Image (cartoon, rainbow, N blue to C red):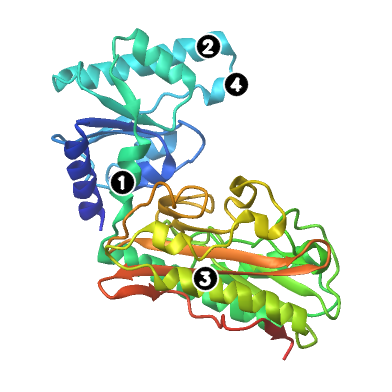
Amino acid sequence: MRQQRAERAKQIMRKNGIPMLLEATPAHSRYLTGLKGFDYQSCRYVLFFAEHDPVMFEHNGSYHQMPDQAPWIKEWRPARSWLTASPGMEASRAEAKKFAADIKREIESKGLLNEKLGIGGFDGLAREALMEAGIKNIVDSRPTMKEAKTIKNQDEINCLKMVSAIVDGVWFKMWETLRPGLKDTDLSAIAAATGYQYGAEFASPGGWRTGPTSFDRGFHQSSRILQVGDLVYSSLCGSTYMGYASCSYRSFIIGREPNSKEKDWYKKLLDRINGVISEIKPGKTTADAAKHFPPASTWGYKDEVEVLASEIGHGIGLGGASSYDIPIINRQWSLDHPQVFEEGMTIAIEAREGETRVGGVRLEDMVVVTENGAELMDYFPRDEITVAPR
């Protein structure tokens, strides 16, 4: 997996005419190198070449400890950081100047000083210092990295299936656990502990919304006490296995069967997501899928931006809870700017229904695009609101 990811990145770099990347975004540097480490902004970074071995600039202890643990990386350097300007602007600019000199030295040694350098994860001080050092041809690394991450190899898909299995286990534990008298903060502690028990690298505590706070998505972890009759939903987004992250929602109801209004909300929700999934096939586009999302005016909103990241499909993979990768499926962009589905894409599809300060339901599924269409990767029951306790 590590070798295949690096080779795919090099192929995309060559295609885009970018011979080198300077990457500090944690998920992107992990994709390129197979290394994880201290994730504070710009404390560690990699200079990654399309035609040469990468140079890893590593943070303090890892710089000394990792070379014999990661023999596939041949070149190691100590990383320079100004800790997001915390030592003051004068000290930060001085350190950024040293950082830029280090990078220039490596680039010049490869004869690439005048070539494009894609950078990601750095602040303005870094860019200014690089420019002042004579590295002028700077571009944004994100389009190249997003493109590289779009198609997954089989090991990456298996990592996402593994994190889906972990999350399925957490949902089952929560179904067993949900009771009147618990608080939403109790649920977070149980969800996180269960995720770690089942093998998550990072276990999401979930974003629990209950009763009248369950529509539309907003504040959570309010210490609200669960009561009989409450609708409850949560995200288990950002649980990871080998860095590959979940994005999953399920809905529950406490101590009773859902009424006709609640069943109607959930039927609309389920039909919508099933419609989107039915369109996810190689050669079809996000415009085909996005037509199954209703317009924002359905809920009295004036603009599609008002449902951004609530009525959406989005690429998933290596990264945390806030990772939105290619492709994006929504009415805001997809109808006018469609993206083509390809085999090997992995996508999460989410939506919600309800009534403000009354209650609501959510569902999100994780799929992989195969030659025959979309294959579900998460299996916890999704066809109806789950009653707890049963």
Dot 1 and dot 3 residues touching (CB under 8 Å):
no
Percent coordinates x, y for residue 330 in the rendering: 50, 55
Residue at left offset 24%, top offset 24%: 116
Residue 84 occupies which quadrant of the picture? top right
Q: Secondary structure at mark 2?
A: helix
Q: Secondary structure at mark 1?
A: helix
Mark linked to residue 343: none
Is residue 195 visible from the viewing direction of this image?
yes
Give the CA separation, mark 1 to mark 3: 25 Å
Mark nearer the N terminus (1 vs 3): 1
Q: Which residue is mark 4?
A: 86
Residue at left offset 80%, top offset 87%: 256
Mark nearer the N terminus (1 vs 4): 4
Residue type at mark 2 is Ala
Residue at left offset 26%, top offset 61%: 153
- Count numbered badges in the picture: 4
Mark linked to residue 273: 3
Residue closest to the eye, 318 or 55: 318
Is residue 57 visible from the viewing direction of this image?
no
Mark linked to residue 147: 1
Residue type at mark 4 is Ser
Residue at left offset 67%, top offset 60%: 298
Dot 3 and dot 2 residues touching (CB under 8 Å):
no
Mark nearer the N terminus (1 vs 2): 2
Dot 4 and dot 2 residues touching (CB under 8 Å):
no
Percent coordinates x, y for residue 322 in the rendering: 53, 49
Badge 4: residue crowd in 10 Å (few <14, some 14–19, many ≥20)? few
Percent coordinates x, y for residue 183 in the rendering: 81, 68
Residue type at mark 3 is Ile
Q: Which residue is mark 2?
A: 91
As drawn, is 39 to the left or to the right of 251?
left
